[in-house]
Amino acid sequence: MTRLNLLMLAALTVLSSNRAMGDEAKPTIKLPAFEPYAVDGAAMWEQFTDSSASRWRRSQAEKKGEEGLRYDGEWEVEELTKLAGIEGDKALVVKSEARHHAISAKLDKTFDPATDGMVFQYEVKLQESLGCGGAYAKLLTTPFAGEFSDATPYTIMFGPDKCGESKIHLIFRHKNPITGEYTEHHLDQPPMPPVDHLSHLYTLVIHPNNTFNMLVDNVEKRTGSLLADFVPPVNPPKEIVDENDKKPEDWVDDAEIPDPKARKPEDWDEDAPLLIPDEEAEKPKGWLEDEPLMVPAPDAEKPADWDDEEDGDWSPPLVPNPKCEDAPGCGPWERPMKRNPEFKGQWSAPLIENPLYKGQWAPRNIPNPAFFEDLELYKLNKIDAVGFELADVASQIAKDVWAPKLASENEVEVATRPKPPPAPKPQMPPVLDMFKARFVEVIDSIHAFYEEFTNEGIISALRNERHGAFGILMLAAGLSWMMWNIVLVFGFVSRIWRETTPRAPGAGAAAAGSGDAAEGSSTGRAAAAATTATKRSAKKSE
Ligand SMILES: *[C@@H]1O[C@H](CO)[C@@H](O)[C@H](O)[C@H]1NC(C)=O
């Protein structure tokens, strides 16, 4: 098994405003205490203890990409304030909001990825949320001058970025062996980073067979090839199109030509017209050939102030000939036109395959003068420093350092999670809410209907799309209620009548019986037609 050189960093880049944290709920659980962890054979191992703070140099350089801007953000090695999982665990914390931060640390000695490949691993915890910015690290190419900025050449850029679409960057710079120029090669379709406030572990492994693994929280997120999965690809195409190639004068690229042997048929009359008069058409009966379409108005009179000398001879205005009104037509009759069956149009020879056709012309390919082939991309440029703008041991660190930290943070997160709001106010049951809403709707409708009724009249109010239906319902309810009252009054009157009138035995009983029956059936009908309110009043009155 290949033993990989390690370039590692247990760093916590954290976005933390200077806001007071006092009001934050303190965890009630006891946190495990920080214990320094030792790593052998790593080019760099950083846990951000007090003694390591001096190793990091804050940049105050000018930004090359944005003129006039300087890196002026502050950094601090300090204990975490939010969801800390380990007592006394410190991190490199970004201190100034909305400013440009850059910080770097030199390696003790230059690291060469060509020797055995490389592992690069670090932690990121977004203590406050990251609005728009990167939490990625750059491995700075040798020789490193000392002050880190956006213009500093890097070998690899790796880590989360959240601005627009969030992604985990993986970019490496490669030197073209022919031109000497550097090109940035970006991982195609990079994965998304986690966005919560916990510590997340980012690991990049580059193998000597030009493959890489990207892990987040020790779980593989992406694996691929340095040769095939980056844009633009490092190695240029072997051949390119020859821009100077020209189509030869005598190149034939017409696939078809008119048949030279074809002759126009004898009977092909190119002059035959498209339309000819329809000889079968007949003049409609009653057509008034001698009647003009317009005639002088019969009752027109020469105006009194018409001066023949000045205005010329007076003639009456023309009006449509009244005789033509009932006739199928007036004036000379003409045959309608129809399509000429003899019409053929211009003759042209049919197309045949061109015997001289050479195919579509395309410029030829020539060997690419800029071609090179680097099949050892893992041999990245040597690295001098780590700047912010590991296999066997790395996974051991993941297990020993990061995993317990995350487990503890998760416990803290659960313990300090905001409790559900205290006993919610007794709320109106949804059914009651619904009734309330319906009631408001009904009141609104009554109001709108009444407004229109008083302003525009009953017909317009009933026709209205919105509350017209409601008006009709009310009208129906009102009528039913009125009828019900009439029935009641009628029943009441007939009872008094019965009780006060001396009755003939037999006949009276029959009359009373039929009266009761009528009342009963009316009640049934009225109740069926009426609204609930009417039904209730019907019950009450029974
Ligand atoms: C490249 O090397 C790594 C580590 O030895 C191995 O896991 C991986 O399968 C190899 N990939 C290829 C395509 O050979």
Image (spheres, grey):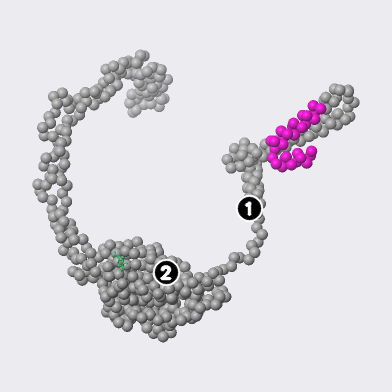
Picture layout, residue 310 above or below residue 40: above
Dot 1 falls on a residue whose secondary structure is helix
Asked whether residue 533 is drawn in magenta, I would say yes
Q: Foreground: 225 or 164?
A: 225
Give the residue type at disc 1.
Pro
Q: Position of residue 148 (x, y in %)?
A: 33, 78
Give the residue type at disc 2.
Asp
Picture layout, residue 149 above or below residue 372: below
Image position of 183 (left or right of 299): left
Image position of 392 (left or right of 197): left
Asked whether residue 316 is drawn in magenta, I would say no
Q: Quadrant of ligand 1?
A: bottom left
Image position of 436 (left or right of 116): right
Image quadrant where one finds the N terminus: bottom left
N-terminal label among 2 and 1: 2
Q: Position of residue 369 (x, y in %)?
A: 16, 63
Image quadrant where one finds the C terminus: top right
Residue underneath mark 1: 430
Examine the image and state in which quarter residue 522 appears.
Answer: top right
Q: Position of residue 182 (x, y in %)?
A: 25, 70
Residue at 37 percent across and 23 percent down: it is 318
Q: Position of residue 52 (x, y in %)?
A: 40, 83
Examine the image and state in which quarter residue 43 appears.
Answer: bottom left
Residue 478's label in the rendered image is none
Find the magenta span and give its range.
Answer: 513-542
Query: Separation of disc 2 and disc 1 at Cα?
Result: 45 Å
The chief SS type of the magenta part is helix
Residue at 13 percent across and 45 percent down: it is 358
Residue at 50 percent across and 80 percent down: it is 33
Q: Is residue 396 in view?
A: yes
Residue underneath mark 2: 217
For the view shown, which residue lies furthest in the front direction? 1
